[in-house]
Image (cartoon, grey):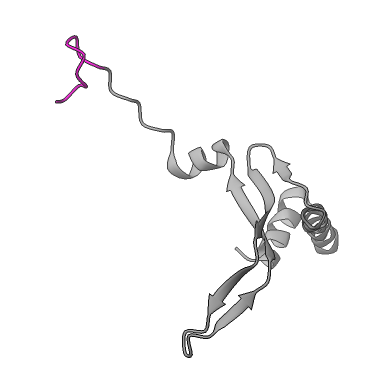
Amino acid sequence: MTKAELIENLSNALKLNRADAENAINSLLGDIVTALKKGERVNISGFGTFSVSVRRARTGRNPKTGEAIPIAESRSARFRPGKQLRDSLNGPAPAIPAATAEGSPAGQ
């Protein structure tokens, strides 16, 4: 799904004109980006959590020459899906089989 499709779906679902739906999406995404730039976590209950991951500076190698090159520290956005999102994608977790009377797992 593209951003344009997301805007169209929001517009249809809430009976908004396209410009208002686009403003809502842009505002939401802008707020998430602003919070991440500040180093804050963004937790959307039932959906997931956005956070910032910092990759420390390190020395890499040029694969062609083998020369050592410095790689600067960088920040990246991470997303960790919430339980409700994971369950909706994968279905509920399978039940753990009960142990038999002798204490060994069922089916062995």
In the picture as drawn, the residue positioned furthest to the left comes out as 108
In what quadrant of the picture does the C terminus appear? top left
* Magenta span main SS: loop
Closest to the observer, 99 or 90? 99
Which residue does the image show at 73% across and 46% down from the upper left?
41
Residue 100: in magenta span: yes
Q: Position of residue 77 (x, y in %)?
A: 67, 58
Q: Report the span colored magenta.
A: 99-108
In what quadrant of the picture does the N terminus appear? bottom right
Which residue does the image show at 56% across and 42% down from the upper left?
85
Instruction: Place residue 25 in its image quadrant.
Output: bottom right
Q: Is residue 42 above or below residue 27?
A: above
Q: Position of residue 100 (x, y in %)?
A: 20, 14
Q: Is residue 85 above or below residue 19?
A: above
Which residue does the image show at 28% across and 23% down from the upper left?
97
Q: Position of residue 13 (x, y in %)?
A: 71, 50
Which residue does the image show at 80% across and 58% down from the upper left?
37
Closest to the observer, 8 or 104? 104
In the picture as drawn, the residue positioned furthest to the front comes out as 68
58 left or right, relative to 64: right
Instruction: Place residue 48 in its image quadrant.
Output: top right
